[in-house]
Image (cartoon, grey):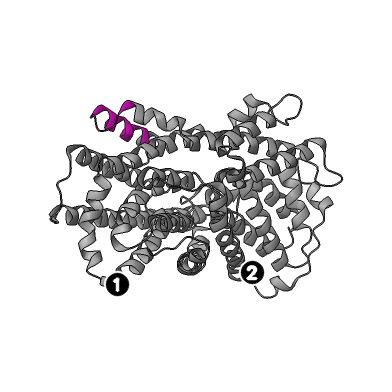
Amino acid sequence: MSAVYYSTTPPPPAPKPSPDASSRAGKTRQAARKALLVRSAAALAGIVVSALIVTAAVQPQSALSPQGAITLVVFVLAVWLWVFTSIDDTYVALGAATVLVLTGTMDTSALFSTLGEETIWLLLAAFVIAAAVSASGLANRGATFIITGASTPRQLVHLVTLALVVTTFAVPSTSGRAALALPVFLALRQVLTDHPPLVKTLAILFPSVILLSAVGSFLGAGAHLITSQILETATGSGFDFATWLLYGLPLALVASHICAEIVLRLFTRPEDRKISLSVSAQDLERHSDTPVTGPLTVAESRAALLLGAVIVLWCTEPLHGLDPALVALIGALVAASPSYGSVKLASALKSVPWSLLLFMAATLALGNALISTGAADWLAGGALTPIQALGAAAAPLFVVAVVLISTLAHLVIQSRSARSAVLIPIVIALSPAVGVNPIAAAFASTAAAGFCHTLTSSAKPVAMFAAVDGIDTYTPRDLLRLSAFLAPVNVVLVLGFSFTLWPLMGLPVLD
């Protein structure tokens, strides 16, 4: 009997995951952690809002009118949709405003008239002027002129910061400024290819400063216009370009340069900060779509003259009496004129973020409804009892709470304009009863809301610079690391300005 031998082949070893697969898995885990963080923050915010409503409901105060009750329900539902769903923010705002009209809570004219508000026209015309400035190439030339003076990394980041602060007056939105600054960053990245840590530092610096410096201009963010309009509805007085500039620009400069120093120290080593740099205009021009050397072109000269004239007229409104929206409209007509302008009106209008304007109009309607129906006063009245129990400490602690909540609100509501529409009516309603100036409290809340750096989804500029040309520039962990240092600094700065500098400048926080 012959033996039979069986030959077996061991199973092949399990394939090792490729580096790309590991990277994708890591990003998936990071995204899951980020989603968990957002959901947790949103849930916490929902609990706080619910507790506030319950507290208001059990307090002995005047009954809430049916219109106020409907407004409050629609308002809370809109906030819930902004937080927990991926439905477009503008769609939610327009839907909420439509519901208020259908239920008879708000007149049809009150909804549609918000589109005719001077703030909407001001922003619309400002976008046309910004399109002309961008088309002329003036912005790139100005940035190059500032940046080429740097000989060390520290000088470079602070000069970049200064250039970004200046753009606050040229482009009326943070996402628009990010789009304008992106080519400058790409040119710098090409020039600094031998210094990867510095490139990463600049990638984080650009969106960070764009967000923090927005407070320097009345047109720096749509939230500023919403705050001013709600203040005007509630108190009869809002902000103009000059007063906002007076209070906001010092904070923008200080916060932006402190942010630059924090970013530099967090993402570069001491040896990286000691290198010698030589960034020439010719180097940047090789990677730019518009000329940045030589004399100013005709288009650039005209754009500079127009922008300067418009800003001067905005700042001197008390002298000539021209409404800022009218000044902006005249500037837009000049910017798009056939013989003088550098852009056609049709092309400029295509660059206008119409979704933003519609969102602003709808959120203005929601904010005004909260005030006009008494919903904001009713909600605030219920929360006053525990606040007033603090006695003399109620006023300063209220301001601290407003700044903290406004700083953290970006974890729940991504849109800065939506955050203002949610927070400002309640802040205005609560302020007088605790001895706080509502105008100062609203300004502090809006300024604090400029911090939105924690997640790539927290603000469009952060998302735009997170992956440029398919190259990862920074990770979610980098943003969390930055936020751990920058958030407390921003809170301290806003509180410091609220209690020290702004009162000296005519904006006392305590009545």
Reply yes or no: does residue 282 show up in magenta: no
Q: Residue at x 24, y 45 (%)?
A: 375
Q: Determine the residue located farthest toward the right in the rendered image.
A: 294
Q: Quadrant of the N terminus?
A: bottom left
**Helix, strand or loop at mark 2:** loop
Q: Which mark is residue 89?
A: none
With respect to residue 1, does 502 lie above or below? below
Q: Which mark is residue 392?
A: 1
Estimate the x, y position of residue 69 in percent, counting from the top left: 20, 41
With respect to residue 359, does 419 lie above or below? below
Mark 1 vs mark 2: give the one in front: 1
Three-letter amino acid code at the position of disc 2: Thr
Reply yes or no: does residue 98 show up in magenta: yes
Q: For the stretch drawn in magenta, what is the main secondary structure? A: helix
Estimate the x, y position of residue 13 in percent, counting from the top left: 47, 58
Say which of 131 and 507 sits in front: 507
| Total marks in image | 2
Q: Earlier in the sequence, mark 1 or mark 2?
A: 2
Estimate the x, y position of residue 408 in percent, counting from the top left: 40, 59
With respect to residue 489, does 112 lie above or below? above
Residue ID for mark 2: 268
Three-letter amino acid code at the position of disc 1: Ala
Q: Is residue 65 left or right of residue 357?
A: left
Q: Quadrant of the C terminus?
A: bottom left
Q: Is residue 213 left or right of residue 141?
A: left
Whole-angstrom CA distance, mark 1 to mark 2, is 46 Å
Q: Residue at x 41, y 36 (%)?
A: 90
Q: Is residue 375 left or right of residue 406?
A: left
Residue 1 seen in the current view: no
What span is colored magenta in the figure?
Answer: 93-108
Say which of 13 and 74 sits in front: 74
